[in-house]
Amino acid sequence: MAIAVEHEKRRKEILGKALMVFMDDGFSDATFQKIADRCGITRTILYLYFKDKKEIFKYSIKQFLTSVEEDIKTIKGDNSLNIIEKITRILLGIMSLMEQNRQLLSVVLDYLMHITKSSVDPETRLRHRTVRFRRILANLVIEGVKTGELKKVNIKTADDYLYSFIESAIFQITVLKRKNIDDLKDTTVFAVRQFSV
């Protein structure tokens, strides 16, 4: 059991350091050797944990998103907040996190451009990574409609609408290189309030 725990601990350390390599060099220029060097191990040892660069990247992003998801679940479970406050805090929290991790967003964009050149559908990859987050938003809308806090709306449309603010934030941060997205945050707060009864 202790060996498995040590293996998992080492794996997480590698993922954290690998993410820094991806952020420094971008997905295309990051190599297995650079990751091994950053971790202070040989490529052979690195192969004991991961089969290739794509797998390391995938798990690095998954580890990052897991921590984000925990924060979202904490907000969702906070009974002192109403539905509008929960949705607003979740969206603004994610936007702030994206501002703080703009380099990581650029790496993800680089990765998506990389896989676009292959036979992999980037939309499928994105949907797979965002499905739990979108489900949380949809569940909050459903709960708000049931409790009468929110207007009756088409849940899928509302979910797409709310998620579009996250997509807009990604675009503004990575493509337009905006230093801050305060205007978008203000618009998001206004838009979420429109769901109120």
Image: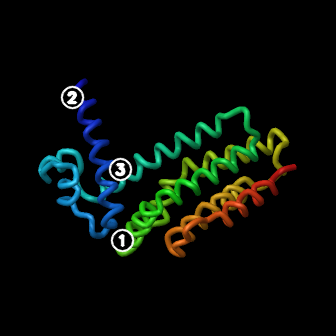
Q: Give the percent coordinates (x, y) of residue 71.
A: 55, 41
Closer to the camera in the image, 130 or 68: 68
Q: Give the percent coordinates (x, y) of residue 44.
A: 12, 50
| Identity of the residue furthest to the front in this view | 179
Residue at x 21%, y 28% (from the top left corner): 3
Along the polypeptide, which appears first: circle 3 or circle 1? 3
The tag on residue 3 is: 2
Residue at x 73%, y 45% (from the top left corner): 85
Q: CA distance from mark 2 to mark 1?
A: 36 Å
The picture quadrant where one finds residue 23 is bottom left
Residue at x 19%, y 53% (from the top left corner): 36
Q: Residues within 10 Å of mark 3 (few under 14, many from 20)?
A: some
- Secondary structure under tag 3 reads helix
**How are the residues colored?**
rainbow
Q: Residues within 10 Å of mark 1 (few under 14, many from 20)?
A: some
Check disc 1 and report the residue beneath it: 114
Q: Residues within 10 Å of mark 2 (few under 14, many from 20)?
A: few
- Secondary structure under tag 2 reads helix
Which quadrant is the N terminus positioned in?
top left
Along the polypeptide, which appears first: circle 2 or circle 1? 2
Q: CA distance from mark 3 to mark 1?
A: 17 Å
| Identity of the residue furthest to the right in this view | 197
The tag on residue 59 is: 3
Q: Amino acid at mark 2?
A: Ile
Residue 182 in the figure: left or right of residue 66: right
